[in-house]
Every structure is written in structure tokens, then in C-alpha cells.
Amino acid sequence: MIGPQTLVFLLIGASILLILVVVIRPSITASREGKIIAFLALFIVPVVAAGVGASEHMERSEQTQFCLSCHIMEPYGRSLYVDDTAYIPAAHFQNHRIPADKACYTCHTDYAMFGTIHAKLEGLHHVYVYWFGTPMNPIRLYQPYNNRECLHCHSGARSFEDSPTHTAMMGDLKSNKLSCTTSGCHDTFHNVDQLGHVKFWKPTE
Amino acid sequence: MLHKLRLSGILLILGLVVEALSLGWNNAFSFMSFVVVGGLLFASGILLFLYSLVSSKTSSLNN
């Protein structure tokens, strides 16, 4: 089975070969067949190759490695290894409650209509600000964290639904009236300013 | 027209090479290279090709 990256490279290779035919012998465009080849070589195939490449890049941008490639995100990456179960991101990451290779994206995307597109646009904005602007310091969320993102996985899970505390306030949790993250129950997150005073978990190779 | 086709092809090849190189890494820099450098080369190549089509049609009509 051909992987997406191999497919992109094959398309790029095929595209370059076709373009070279036109570049080396542009006179072929005098004939009708030559015009069709030129249109394929200089428009259709490159557009498809670029589209598949862009799609592959967008897919990769969901990976933890991508988010942490910006220097400013480095402490947030370290916070995933804090050896303290009170740290919500660390506990989720270390116990694979979220995919470890897409840790940032899984919790920081919007599980709503067009949520993925919204998350990608925000990601593009982050990259733009990182390279051409001044990132906010300290980093803050654009909006308060929505319970919807927690409930996307936890809703319906036995450990969540069976908890009497959750059951008593389920309506308020689902309507986002009572925040999971700021109501005093689950309020320890990346806390990057305290990373100098915590123990870290070292995964075994 | 032939000169424009050649130039368009060269720009597209350069854009595709940048795209291929950018896929070698998974970080914000490679993504920005793909979008900014690759995208500019690619867009210039495509636009030049389309312009060559339109301008050759115009010149043949004038003749």
C-alpha cells in the first residue's frame, strides 16, 4: 500500500518529468497533442501534486512534534512529562487517553462544525505570529476552554458517567455553564511557570 | 510564448522541488517554506502559464 508521502513524491516526480518535456521541447505545443501535454504538465498535474502536498502538510501539522517545533512551545511539551496526576495534560498524555502523537491537537481543536478548519486557521495564525509578529507572553487561550472538548471523549465513558459528582451536575457540564477547568475540580494544566519545581516522568525506551 | 512556457515550467519545477524538500521535515519552518517559497514559485509558474495562454490567443486574434 502506497503511503501519502510516497504518493506526494511520486506525483512530484511525475510532474517534474512532464514539465521537463515541455521545458526542453516547447515546440511540441505547436500540435494539438502537444498543447494537451503542456496543459497537463504545466497546470493539471502540478496543481494535483501541490494539493496533495498541502493536504499532507496539514495532516502533519496535527502532530505533537510539529506544535513543539516552535521554541515558544517547548515548556508546554515538557509539561506533558510532569510526574503528577493532577496535571491534566500530563495525565492524559502519559496514559494515552489522547493519541500521544497528536496530543496538542486532540485537546485544542474544536469539536464543533468546522472545528477542524477553525483549528487549522488558528494554527496558521500561530505560525504567522511566531515568524512575523510578537507572540503573546504568557501564551493564553483565545477563549475559555469549552467543556465540549472534554466531553467529546468523556461523555458516555463509564468512569465519567458513573461518578456521582459528575451526575449531579451533568446538565451544567453539558451546557458549559459549569466549567470542568475553572470550577475547582480539574484546574491544573500546563503551569509552565512552575516546571522548575516539579518531578518529571521518564518514559522507558 | 515558448519563452514564457519555459519560464513557467522552470518556476513550477522549483516550486515542486521546494515542496518535496519541505516534506523531509515536520516542523513550522518546513511548513512556512512550503507555503511562502514553494507557494510563490508555484503560483508564479501557474499564473505565467495561464498568461501565456491568454496572450498567445490575443496575439493570434490580432494577427
Image (cartoon, grey):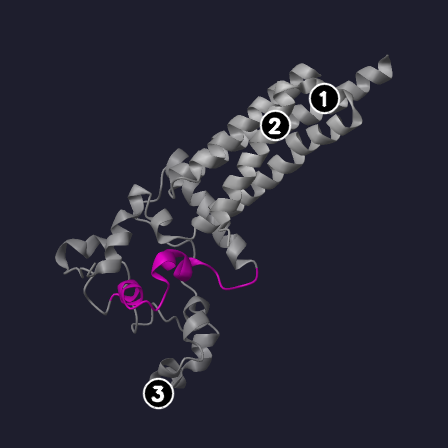
Magenta region includes residue A196: no
Q: Residue placed at 24% from the left, 54% from the top?
A: A78
Letter of the chain that mark 3 sits on in the rendering: A
Q: Give the spatial CA distance, label 1 vs label 2.
A: 12 Å
Magenta region includes residue A98: yes
- Residue A169 lies, with reference to residue B29, above or below; the image says below
Residue A151 or residue A64, whichever sits in front: A64
Q: Earlier in the sequence, mark 2 or mark 3?
A: 2
State the residue position of label 3: A164
State the residue position of label 1: A28
Q: Give the spatial CA distance, label 1 vs label 3.
A: 76 Å
Residue B41 placement, left or right of A201: right
As drawn, which residue projects farthest toward the front?
Answer: A1
Q: Position of residue A112 (x, y in %)?
A: 53, 63
Letter of the chain that mark 2 sits on in the rendering: A
- Residue B4 lies, with reference to residue A40, above or below; the image says above
Q: Amino acid at mark 1?
A: Ile
User: How many marks on residues?
Assistant: 3
State the residue position of label 2: A19
Q: Which residues are magenta?
A: A87-113
Q: Earlier in the sequence, mark 1 or mark 3?
A: 1
Letter of the chain that mark 1 sits on in the rendering: A
User: Can residue B24 be spotted in the picture?
Assistant: yes
Q: Amino acid at mark 2?
A: Ile
Per the image, label 2 sits on a secondary structure element best described as helix
Q: Residues within 10 Å of mark 1 (few under 14, many from 20)?
A: some
Q: Are marks 1 and 2 in contact (CB under 8 Å)?
A: no
Q: Earlier in the sequence, mark 1 or mark 2?
A: 2
